[in-house]
Image: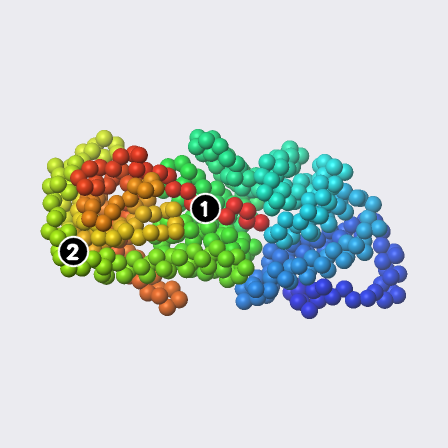
Amino acid sequence: MAEVSELSLGDTGSTNKTDQIEQTAITPAMALQKTEEAVNDLFEYRDRYFERFGVEKSHKKADDVKAKLKETLHLISEMRDKINNKAMLNMLQGKALNVTADFDEEALDLLSKAVKLDPKLLEAWNHLGECYWKSGNIPSAKNCFTGALNYQKNKVSLRNLSMVLRQLSGPPAEKVSLIEESVEKAKEAIQLDIKDGTSWLILGNAYLSLFFTAGQNPKVLKQCMSAYAQAERDPVAQGNPDLHFNRATSYQYQEEYQLALAGFAQATLLDPGWEEPGEKETQLLQYLDTLTDMINTKGKMKGKKFESLVQSMNEDKDLGPYRGGSYTGSKGKSVTLKKVKLSDLQPEINHERVVTGKVVCTLSSQEALTFTFCMVDEDQTCFPVNVYNIAKGSGVKIGDSVAIPDPYVQLVKVNHKGKVFEFSGIRVDLPVMLVVNGKKLGLDKQAMSVLSVSAMSE
């Protein structure tokens, strides 16, 4: 693919006599073709910018695309009087104006005229839907994409409809149904072009939404990560900051902090003007910094207060319903339990084991994903615990006793931008497994997490 010179952007120059003669000889068909090629080149320039100029030029991308847009609009202006097909002319100019991430009122007007002049103009419906999306008019966006599919099944309408469906509101059962439909639309888009990375990205986002809305099935999360991996094979999707941001958010949920931080950093690198990835990266580093300090200082609890807390541990009382050496699992089967110390735990799941301890600190987080606290056992070993899906205001407090059956231990190793963290922690996916002060937490303490993913990835 030929590299586009930055020096040529916006440099329309003046036409000489020969150029004027050549333009006079241009037929309507030639003018339309020339205009269509210019608009397609504009989008190719935007989508493959990093292939041409490298990530180090990311800070110039927005301005360069606007300069290329100005050049394209100038050409359209020159060709306007030679094009007989007004529907196509409106569509091409509206499409060009829709190349940026911002809503453009003129683009909306031109594309609306295009579909009125030619209701079967598929590309006009898709770009009109995107304009409505950018303006926040989700129902109108849905109508555009659905209308386009009524004329012809195509990947752009399908994946855009997939995104729209996830934004529609409704009661919980209806919301799950909409997201399941969103997954199916994204799958249909991939079936039409299995190599299109943007469609794979949309499918990954749909799976991620389904994971957090419909019971957090590990299989669905695996499908999500697989879709993101497929998306990354496409240079266009690979240069999309949404891919790296959304995948980083899912990595953070999985406590793969090294990969999460790298993903947030990459999203910032690809779009320096997007503040959220940098903020997430900073927040996560601050969280790990604070957590490490709490682990090393045992919650900064000192002296007699700490000694009194450790001495107050009562194994039988703290175990609560687990004191009998077994408990009834989710499938109604009796599960044997053996009380062990925190230092005895091994990486990943510790089957048929239970640990107890006292809460020495809790950590506030700007993320809605977790509730974090640190606990110490009778040997004064300190472990952090991340509890997921706990209802707001239902966390533990300093001094509470906690028992955790079948504890899942996650090893954390991070080396990012000069910050190094290494520790082991316990992950609890459902709060109902916890015993706090001798009593098992009820279902009223559980709330499904909602993970925010970027929905529009065009």
Q: Count of labels shown? A: 2
Q: Residue 236 vs residue 264: left or right?
A: right
In the rendered image, residue 40, in percent from the top left (x then y), is placed at 68, 53
Quadrant showing the N terminus:
bottom right
Disc 2: which residue: 306
Q: Secondary structure at mark 1?
A: loop
Residue placed at 45% from the left, 57% from the top? 279
Which amino acid type is marked by label 1?
Ser
Asked whether residue 142 is in view, the answer is no
Which amino acid type is marked by label 2?
Phe
Which numbered disc, 1 or 2, marks the residue closer to the eye?
2
Asked whether residue 321 is in view, the answer is yes
Q: Secondary structure at mark 2?
A: helix
Residue 115 picture quarter: top right
Residue placed at 71% from the left, 37% from the top? 120
Q: Residue 42 vs residue 386: left or right?
A: right
Q: Residue 371 vs residue 45: left or right?
A: left
- Image disc number at residue 132: none
Nearer to me, 430 or 440:
440
Residue 323 picture quarter: top left
Residue placed at 43% from the left, 48% from the top? 225
CA neighbours of label 1 inside 10 A, class few (<14), some (14 to 19), many (20+): some
CA neighbours of label 2 inside 10 A, class few (<14), some (14 to 19), many (20+): some
Residue placed at 26% from the left, 56% from the top? 424
Distance from disc 1 to disc 2, alpha carbons, whole Å, reads 39 Å
Nearer to me, 358 or 413:
358
Nearer to me, 188 or 415:
415
In the rendered image, residue 307, in percent from the top left (x then y), is placed at 13, 55
Sequence order check: which comes first, mark 1 or mark 2? 2
- Image disc number at residue 452: 1
In the rendered image, residue 456, in percent from the top left (x then y), is placed at 55, 47
